[in-house]
Image: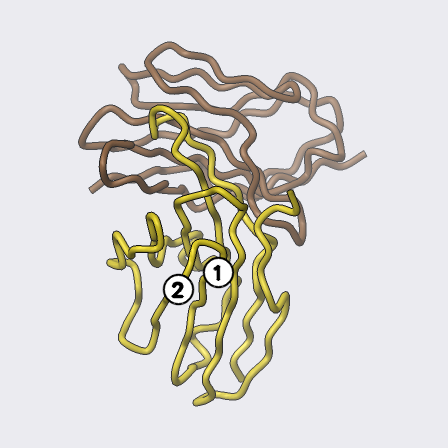
Amino acid sequence: GDSVTQMEGPVTLSEEAFLTINCTYTATGYPSLFWYVQYPGEGLQLLLKATKADDKGSNKGFEATYRKETTSFHLEKGSVQVSDSAVYFCALTLGGSNYKLTFGKGTLLTVNP
Amino acid sequence: DAGVIQSPRHEVTEMGQEVTLRCKPISGHDYLFWYRQTMMRGLELLIYFNNNVPIDDSGMPEDRFSAKMPNASFSTLKIQPSEPRDSAVYFCASSSRTGSMRNTEAFFGQGTRLTVV
């Protein structure tokens, strides 16, 4: 079945460090890919998305590029802030008639001042 | 819009009791999802509805779990009887099909933290 694999956390960085969170997927079709973020005590919210190969999603300094050849959608940010501390989820959907989001297990990021 | 509203935010109950979680989706959204989040299993889709009709309930763990959506503005997830292993954060999310479903964003509520003792 369809699945998303994220790098195991937790990830701890110092402020202004470079961030990469790896995400790979397995899908029976041609998915759209998403990154969601969950701040402490809150629900998930969409961070960025990409719907076709080579698309780059970006938001709030975060970027991810849809790589069909490696089935990957790695999240990157050049300089993290303390306020970026959260859990990050990679997800996919195939759309069509049976819409659902399949999530990875999430990666906890802690940024220290 | 106030977003997706879930109640209660926290629920502590004794094993064997019935628990009902409630969700009000964003007005105009025609998809509603129930997810369960635990440390061990991450975020699991339990069931989702389209236009108030259950489409996929394959994630519902067992017969003790049931979900209903009597109208477009309200859904419930019921656990009867509850067990300690049901302790988790339960999220409701809603979305609206705008053009291709491939672009659709899901909007999440703040979740209900359930503790069964």
Tell me: A31 left or right of B91. Answer: left
Q: Which chain is brown?
A: A
Q: Colour of chain B?
A: yellow
* Callout 1 crowding tier (Cα within 10 Å): few <14, some 14–19, many ≥20: some
Q: Residue at x 30, y 67 (%)?
A: B61
Which residue is the extreme one toward the right?
A113
Q: Position of residue A64 (x, y in %)?
A: 48, 19
Amino acid at pointer 1? Phe
Q: Residue at x 50, y 69 (%)?
A: B21
- The dot on residue B70 is 2
Task: Name the element at disc 1.
Answer: strand
Tell me: A104 left or right of A44. Answer: left
Q: Position of residue B51 (x, y in %)?
A: 34, 49
Tell me: A34 left or right of A42. Answer: left
Q: Residue at x 42, y 59 (%)?
A: B71
Amino acid at pointer 2? Pro
